[in-house]
Image (tube, rainbow, N blue to C red):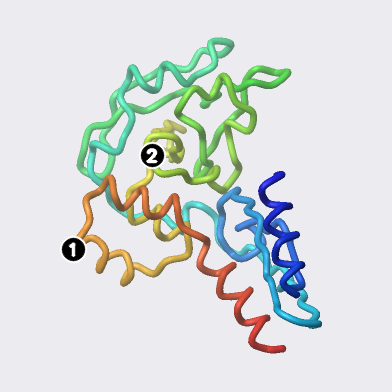
Amino acid sequence: IHDFHQWCFSLEKLGYSNYVKNISALEHGIPQTRIRTFMVSILGDCYYEFPQPVPLNKCLKDMLEKNVDKHYFLSRDRIRKLLSIRFSQEIVNIEYEDKTVCGVKNGIYIAENSKKGYAAAGDGDGIYIERPGKKRGAVQKGRIQTLKTSGHDVAVVLEISEEEVFCIRRLTPLEFWRLMGFSDEDYHKAVKVNTETQLYKQAGNSIVVSILEAIFKQLFMK
């Protein structure tokens, strides 16, 4: 914070006006709980107003691929480590999209660092899969937690049978890119010259495209 204030002060000494705002991806059409600080600096006496939020018309499930490889689905042991021990949640093998995966029966309750100690997850909810018991917000309804530079931190819960059996799978690199606002065309260009690890890293280090577009559009309107 100190360095940021020093940077703002240095710009002001040079004659810039600084405008700062925390903006969530949820405010610009992306179902990701991601808040970042943006600053627009304009030389001279000029007023800037950040763009207004737009309605969130998409949920996490809208951003998912229809059929993904089996290795994205969590194993029995990995699932067991996520579940709250307060509930009888049975892990079973089940056929889904022409593959055998592990599913959870009797509801799905993820351990989290809260007063209750758990959070219920349903179809299309995002969850932490890296030490969720030490975190708050282990379940995000219809959205995903902040994407980082690895595909091993978060996952999505999907209902895979009429008997209310749920599976848990990691997001694909393409889904990471979609959740940062990139088009599938952008992703398929990047696939040609990047590894899967690099694709996750590039997405996690990026800025949500729709936010950046809105900021520049507002700037050019002045």
Vertically, is 94 above or below 204?
Answer: above
Split into 4 quadrants, where in the image is the C terminus? Answer: bottom right
Mark 1, Cα crowd under 10 Å, few <14 / some 14-19 / many 20+, is few
Foreground label between 1 and 2: 1
Residue shown at the point (47%, 21%) measured from the top left: 82
Q: Earlier in the sequence, mark 1 or mark 2?
A: 2
Q: Identify residue type, mark 2.
A: Ile
Q: Which mark is residue 192?
A: 1
Residue shown at the point (60%, 26%) measured from the top left: 135
Question: Which residue, given by chain and number where applicable, does mark 2 sit on?
Answer: 160
> Is 39 positioned to the left or the right of 201 in the image?
right
Where residue 31 sits, quadrant-wise, is bottom right
Q: Residue 32's spot in the image, x, y percent?
A: 56, 51
Q: Residue 183's spot in the image, x, y percent?
A: 39, 69
> Is 174 positioned to the left or the right of 50 in the image?
left
Residue shown at the point (38%, 19%) measured from the top left: 91
Q: Nearer the viewer, residue 107 or 72?
A: 72
Q: Nearer the viewer, residue 35 or 28?
A: 35
Vertically, is 178 above or below 118?
Answer: below
Split into 4 quadrants, where in the image is the N terminus? Answer: top right
Q: How many marks?
A: 2
Mark 2, Cα crowd under 10 Å, few <14 / some 14-19 / many 20+, is some
Furthest residue in direction bottom, as rendered: 221
Where residue 22 sits, quadrant-wise, is bottom right
